[in-house]
Amino acid sequence: MAEEWRRGEFLVSTDPASIDVEAVHRWLSEESYWVPGIPLDVVRRGVESSLNFGLYDGERQVGLARIISDYATFAYVCDVFVLEAYRGRGLGVWLMECVAQHPHLQGLRRWMLGTRDAHTLYEKTGFAPVAAPDRWMEKLDAGWAAKTS
């Protein structure tokens, strides 16, 4: 069953049928710094395999937070965005608060995310720099790494 939160005219919903994959693809491929040019089929597969929190103004999708999780110990937050015209209203923080309230994401040992420029937003919802960065490693696909550096 989908979860929903309302704030004035805005809605956050986890209903998979509400996600406008084309709008998400358009923003990620044209506006994001982390996946410029990402193919539509990759966005579609990611959305289909994740817990998605769509942010809506009426019927229009104006933001997203995508969560990859085992629902037991770990969650990775990715592809978070709010359209430029909707920024400055606290919607990004509210979106992340909705993520944190989801019943299937309670009691997890660790949440992770990566950001280049939104540290302050995520700090408002409990995120902090990695406590032991010497313990973490990553493996990057050379093709993706070249596009997002």
Image (cartoon, rainbow, N blue to C red):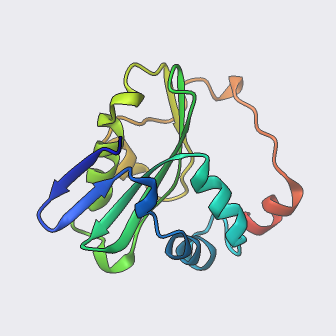
Q: 147 above or below 96?
A: below
Q: Nearer the viewer, residue 49 or 82?
A: 49
- Taking the spot 36% from the left edge, 71% from the top edge, the residue there is 62
**Res 104 quadrant in image:** top left
- Taking the spot 82% from the left edge, 65% from the top edge, the residue there is 146
Q: Residue 112: x, y in percent?
A: 54, 36
In the visual, does 48 lie left or right of 77? right
The N terminus sits in image quarter: top left
Q: Residue 94: x, y in percent?
A: 26, 52
**Res 138 quadrant in image:** top right
In the visual, does 96 lie left or right of 131? left
The C terminus sits in image quarter: bottom right
Q: Residue 145: x, y in percent?
A: 80, 59
Q: Nearer the viewer, residue 129 or 28?
A: 28
Q: Which residue lies furthest to the right in this view?
A: 142
Q: Nearer the viewer, residue 12 or 122?
A: 12
Q: Residue 40: x, y in percent?
A: 68, 71
- Taking the spot 50% from the left edge, 76% from the top edge, the residue there is 23
Q: 57 above or below 75?
A: below
Q: Which of 129 and 143 is in front in this view?
A: 143
Q: Which residue lies furthest to the left in this view?
A: 8
In the visual, does 13 lie left or right of 28? left
